[in-house]
Structures are given as structure tokens and as C-alpha cells.
């Protein structure tokens, strides 16, 4: 309850949540598409929906109450002096392009960054409540989409929306779940959640997202202090099996998940056609108030046998369990 109270207070301070939205935080959504959805989302075609509306909750902030960033300013790695060495960043290195890093200190407060790397439009997404970080290609059915934060949650994961069709998109799966584009899927791109020190050392000539100038947020701090050792916020789904704590971290590769504790103990695993490695030096963004001082979670890398980076992420076990019906738990012997 202390965490929920802290989260609501943070929302009130940072996003000026309306009284109606705050009431919805702990209210179940009815089985039918609620009238308030149709009123708040008149542009969305709710005749097309692939989920049970009862799985959706208001997270508190209204649509765009958490402001996504479009067209971030990127600066040289050498010019960055605010990020702590252990702070996590999401990084992407596309063939022929300068590698880029997007600090979680900014993603924590904005959750989506719409950017363009060369000719490729991308969306860098991070849902703190699931520790889910994915980079997507923003091209869908001949359109380039700009994504925003809906303020809604499903199984405690952010529901995104696009500003072209106002379809709703599940961040964890990249699938459109309501609206004109229902059933379409965003293509996930290989990316890393790694420490700033690791990225800046490996790519001294790389680029990093600069601090957003148009928003006032306590960047570098975690508004969900103690979250990754508590309970999932507004989660109403099934608990993970095998005695796994809902907020234990797992390495997700497609429909498989390896407990992070197992990989951390081994250091390296070669299973199911991929190679997983763990290296210390990265702080959890969701433990202490100061992100750089977070408890050690390390950096995971998943590659094919030829060394090519594979799409993966380190997420909470409850989210993997809820969104992956054909899941396989890689528990070892």
C-alpha cells in the first residue's frame, strides 16, 4: 500500500492527475467497452478489439499525462556528464549507423521516445511497472506511426497508442489490441539494456539522448522506490509458477524465459540456439530513489552462435507469464 500511495502522490505531483482519473486507479473496468473510453477516445474504432476490456485499468495519468518524446536531441557521448556509470541505458546499434543510447533516467518519466536512425523510424519504449524495454520499428502497413502513452495498463503493462489511427498497442507484445489496426504487430529490433559505463566505453564516438528541455522532471531519480522488491502495481493476472517471485527478473527471448538468478550464477549459458551472458556493473532502476545507487542487476546480452545480437529483454516474471501463453521456462536441472 505504501508503494501505491507513493506512486499516486508522484502522479499527482508530476502529471496533475484529474480527480476522475485518480478514482479509476483502483476501479475495475466493466466487461463491455466502457462509455468513458468512447468519450475519452472518440477517434478509436472500438468495433475492433482483441482483448477482454475487463483486463484494462487506468494507471492514473490521462492520455499523454506521461509525455512521450518525439525527435530527441542527441549529443556526443563525450559531451554527457550527468549520467552515473551504473545507470541503465537502452542502446541500439544499427548497421551503418552511429550507436545510440537512451538513458532510463529519461525513459522512466516519458516511457516512449519516437526517433529516427538514418532512414529507420524507431520507438524506444520502457514500461517501469514491468521493467520491459523494447525498441520497435514504427512502420506498420505502409504508415509511419508516432506513439504516445495512453495512461492505461493491462496486466500492469503500458498501453501505447498511435497518433494516426488512435489504435491501442500493448507495449510488451508490440501488438495492436484495439482500433483500426487491431492485430497488426510492431517489429522489435535488437537492443540492449546496459550500464552507461559499458555503452560509453564501447562506443566513445556514439550518441546519447540529451536531457529533454521542454519538461521539468527529477531526472535521475526513481519515483517507484522499492518497487522491484514489492508487488506488481494493479496486476490482476495469474502468478508465475515454479515458486518465482512476481518481480523476479527473467531474460525473455521470444516464448522462452531464463531466470536472471540462474544466468547470474552461471555467467554464461548456451541453450535453445542462443548464447546468454551476464556481466556486473548495472544498477536496478527500480530499487533506490537515486537510480545510479540501485542494487546490482548486471547486464545481459543474448546472441546467436555467430555473435549477432538477438531480440531480448530482462523483465519481471509476472509480465512474461501473463503475456506469453505458449511460454517455456528455462529453469535448468
Image: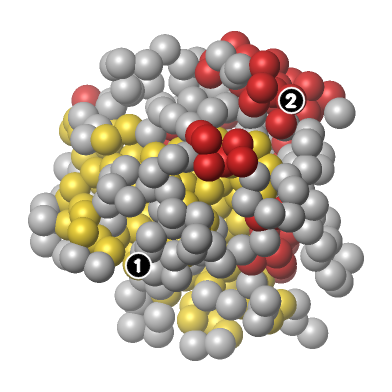
Q: Secondary structure at mark 1?
A: strand
Q: Which residue is mark 1?
A: 187
Relative image position of residue 276 (x, y in whole percent): 53, 72
Q: Work out whether residue 43 or residue 10 is closer to the camera in this orientation and state it.
A: 43
Tell us which disc is closer to us: 2 or 1.
2
For the point 78% across and 28% down, the residue is: 3
Packing grade of label 2 (10 A; few <14, some 14-19, many >=20) is few
Q: Which color mode does the image show? A: secondary structure
Q: Where, by quadrant of the figure, is residue 224 drawn?
A: top right
For the point 65% across and 81% down, the residue is: 326
Which residue extends farthest bottom?
A: 273
Relative image position of residue 119 (x, y in whole percent): 11, 56
Relative image position of residue 176 (x, y in whole percent): 45, 61
Relative image position of residue 94 (x, y in whole percent): 22, 61
Q: Work out whether residue 294 or residue 14 is closer to the camera in this orientation and state it.
A: 14
Mark number, residue 93: none
For the point 53% across and 48% down, the residue is: 159
Spatial CA distance of label 2 from label 1 is 35 Å
Q: Is the residue 311 above or below the residue 7 in the image? A: below
- On screen, residue 249 versus residue 197, left or right, reads right
Q: Is the residue 86 above or below the residue 65 in the image? A: below
Q: Which residue is mark 2?
A: 23
User: Which quarter of the rendering shows the C terminus?
Assistant: bottom right
Residue 199 seen in this snapshot: no
Whichever of callouts 2 and 1 sits on the residue coming sooner in the sequence is 2
For the point 17% across and 42% down, the residue is: 205
Q: Secondary structure at mark 2?
A: helix
- On screen, residue 74 versus residue 197, left or right, reads left
Residue 27 seen in this snapshot: yes
Amino acid at each position: 500500500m505504501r508503494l501505491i500511495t507513493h506512486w499516486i502522490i508522484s502522479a499527482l505531483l508530476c502529471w496533475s492527475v484529474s480527480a476522475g482519473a485518480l478514482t479509476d486507479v483502483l476501479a475495475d473496468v466493466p466487461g463491455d467497452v466502457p462509455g468513458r473510453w468512447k468519450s475519452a477516445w472518440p477517434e478509436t474504432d472500438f468495433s475492433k478489439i482483441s482483448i477482454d476490456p475487463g483486463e484494462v485499468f487506468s494507471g492514473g495519468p490521462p492520455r499523454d499525462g506521461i509525455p512521450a518524446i518525439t525527435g530527441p536531441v542527441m549529443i556526443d557521448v563525450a559531451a554527457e556528464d550527468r549520467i552515473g556509470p551504473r545507470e541503465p541505458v537502452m542502446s541500439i546499434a544499427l548497421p551503418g549507423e552511429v550507436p545510440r543510447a537512451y538513458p532510463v533516467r529519461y525513459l522512466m518519466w516519458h516511457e516512449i521516445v519516437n526517433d529516427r536512425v538514418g532512414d529507420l523510424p524507431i520507438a524506444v519504449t520502457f514500461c517501469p511497472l514491468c521493467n520491459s524495454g523494447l525498441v520497435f520499428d514504427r512502420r506498420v502497413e505502409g504508415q509511419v506511426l508516432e506513439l504516445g502513452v495512453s495512461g492505461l495498463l493491462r496486466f500492469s503493462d503500458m498501453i501505447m497508442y498511435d497518433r494516426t489511427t488512435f489504435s491501442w498497442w500493448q507495449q510488451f507484445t508490440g501488438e495492436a489490441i484495439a482500433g483500426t489496426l487491431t492485430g497488426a504487430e510492431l517489429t522489435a529490433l535488437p537492443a540492449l539494456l546496459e550500464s552507461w559505463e559499458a555503452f560509453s566505453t564501447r562506443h566513445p564516438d556514439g550518441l546519447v539522448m540529451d536531457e529533454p528541455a521542454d519538461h521539468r522532471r527529477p531526472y535521475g531519480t526513481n519515483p517507484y522506490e522499492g518497487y522491484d522488491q514489492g508487488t506488481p502495481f494493479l496486476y490482476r493476472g495469474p502468478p508465475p509458477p515454479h515458486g518465482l517471485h512476481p518481480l523476479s527478473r527473467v531474460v525473455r527471448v521470444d516464448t522462452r524465459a531464463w531466470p536472471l538468478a540462474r544466468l547470474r550464477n552461471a555467467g554464461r549459458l548456451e541453450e535453445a540456439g542462443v548464447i546468454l551472458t551476464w556481466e556486473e556493473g548495472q544498477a536496478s532502476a527500480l530499487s533506490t530513489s537515486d537510480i545510479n545507487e540501485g542494487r546490482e542487476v548486471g547486464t545481459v546480452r543474448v546472441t546467436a552462435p555467430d555473435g549477432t545480437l538477438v531480440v531480448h529483454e530482462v523483465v519481471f516474471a509476472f509480465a512474461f507469464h501473463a503475456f506469453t501463453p505458449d511460454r517455456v521456462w528455462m529453469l535448468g536441472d
